[in-house]
């Protein structure tokens, strides 16, 4: 595609996950790749909280139960939880991870994070978030939530070994990218109740195969890669992209370019 477009100024992705863009080829062609964090970050952070709360209160099960004419007012109590007092383990502490930490604070939950790049101390302080090694995070968190990019280094960052480190009551949330998690290992961990539940906006294969083993598990809550997909976000994104295009057409450098350090 790049060879066929010799006059190309810019590749502008409407989201922030650039795992489907050949960054090296763009760089070789001298074409910057710009991302659109505007309209992406808040939606994903809100969706993360939505999945946690929906899992903690069994929404997937109770809504159909009420519609089917039952009224399970007691049945779920011993298996329902509050977010207050829990510890969120955030893997990846960039734009989205930090917005999740901010929202977790409002729910009186604590946050620890794993990221190769420490956040500035004032951000850690403002968000009451402490950096920890990955294994320690997995062993301590009540909720593990992924907010890092997919790359050859992060593919299956959560595999069987890592899932075994998680606590039996722990919940895994993935609103980042499906292949960050070894899905077969996740299905096995959930089926054998080594972890409690998973809320997944993304899967290794999208759309998934109808016989995906996760579909058979009551402890899994699924959404179809819609974490950032709102009318609010769409408007914000299109405005941000138009502003960036204006910038480039005036000869100015675009904002939110994938950094040179990314390989
Ligand atoms: P970001 O670049 O602001 O933050 C990513 C963070 O991950 C950075 O701080 C980086 O240092 C960290 N990181 C990199 N490698 C890591 C590793 N091996 N272990 C731990 N942390 C690591 O990106 P963002 O805007 O917060 O977005 C995060 C990801 O969310 C995106 O890459 C994208 O795949 C995903 N996303 C999903 C949706 C959706 O609709 N479900 C929407 C937007 C973004």
Image: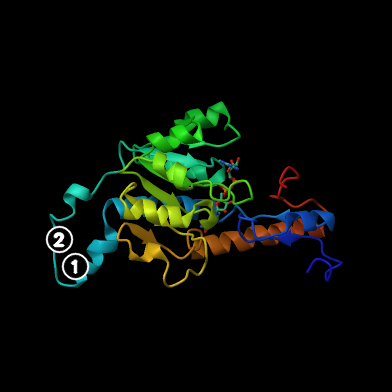
Q: How many marks?
A: 2
Q: Earlier in the sequence, mark 1 or mark 2?
A: 1
Vertical relation: 67 (above or below) 118: below
List x then y, in percent, for residue 204: 52, 60
Q: Label 1 neighbourhood size at 10 Å, few (<14), some (14-19), many (20+)?
A: few
Residue highlighted by disc 1: 66
Vertical relation: 183 (above or below) 1: above
Who is closer to the viewer here, 172 or 249? 172
Residue highlighted by disc 2: 72
**Display coloring:** rainbow
Q: Element under label 2?
A: loop
Residue 248: mark: none
Who is closer to the viewer here, 189 or 5? 189
Q: Label 2 neighbourhood size at 10 Å, few (<14), some (14-19), many (20+)?
A: few
Would residue 128 appear left or right of 233 to someone viewing this image? left
Discs 1, 2 touching: Cβ within 8 Å:
yes
Who is closer to the viewer here, 247 or 116? 116
Outermost residue, right direction? 6
Who is closer to the viewer here, 64 or 44? 64
Would residue 197 appear left or right of 63 to someone viewing this image? right
List x then y, in percent, for residue 69: 14, 72
Vertical relation: 202 (above or below) 131: below
- Look at 61% across and 34% down and name the residue there: 117
Quadrant for residue 139, please give it: top left
- Look at 53% across and 51% down and name the residue there: 180
């Amino acid at each position: 595609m790049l060879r066929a477009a010799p006059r190309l100024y810019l590749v502008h992705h409407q989201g922030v996950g650039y795992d489907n863009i050949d960054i090296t080829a763009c760089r070789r062609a001298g074409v910057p790749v710009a991302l659109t964090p505007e309209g992406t970050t808040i939606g994903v952070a809100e969706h993360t909280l939505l999945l946690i709360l929906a899992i903690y209160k069994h929404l997937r099960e109770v809504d159909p139960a009420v519609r089917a004419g039952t009224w399970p007012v007691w049945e779920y109590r011993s298996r329902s939880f509050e977010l207050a007092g829990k510890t969120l383990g955030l893997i990846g502490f960039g734009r989205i991870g930090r917005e999740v930490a901010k929202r977790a604070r409002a729910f009186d939950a604590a946050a620890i994070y794993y990221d190769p790049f420490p956040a500035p101390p004032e951000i850690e302080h403002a968000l009451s978030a402490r950096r920890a090694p990955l294994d320690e995070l997995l062993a301590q968190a009540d909720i593990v939530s992924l907010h890092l990019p997919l790359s050859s280094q992060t593919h299956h960052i959560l595999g069987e070994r890592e899932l075994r480190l998680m606590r039996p009551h722990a919940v895994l949330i993935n609103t980042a990218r499906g292949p960050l998690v070894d899905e077969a290992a996740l299905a096995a961990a959930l089926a054998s109740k080594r972890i409690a539940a998973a809320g997944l906006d993304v899967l290794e294969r999208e759309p998934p195969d109808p016989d995906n083993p996760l579909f058979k598990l009551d402890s899994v809550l699924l959404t179809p890669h819609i974490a950032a997909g709102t009318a609010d976000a769409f408007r914000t994104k299109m405005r941000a992209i138009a502003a960036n295009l204006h910038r480039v057409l005036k000869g100015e450098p675009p904002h939110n370019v994938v950094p040179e350090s990314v390989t």
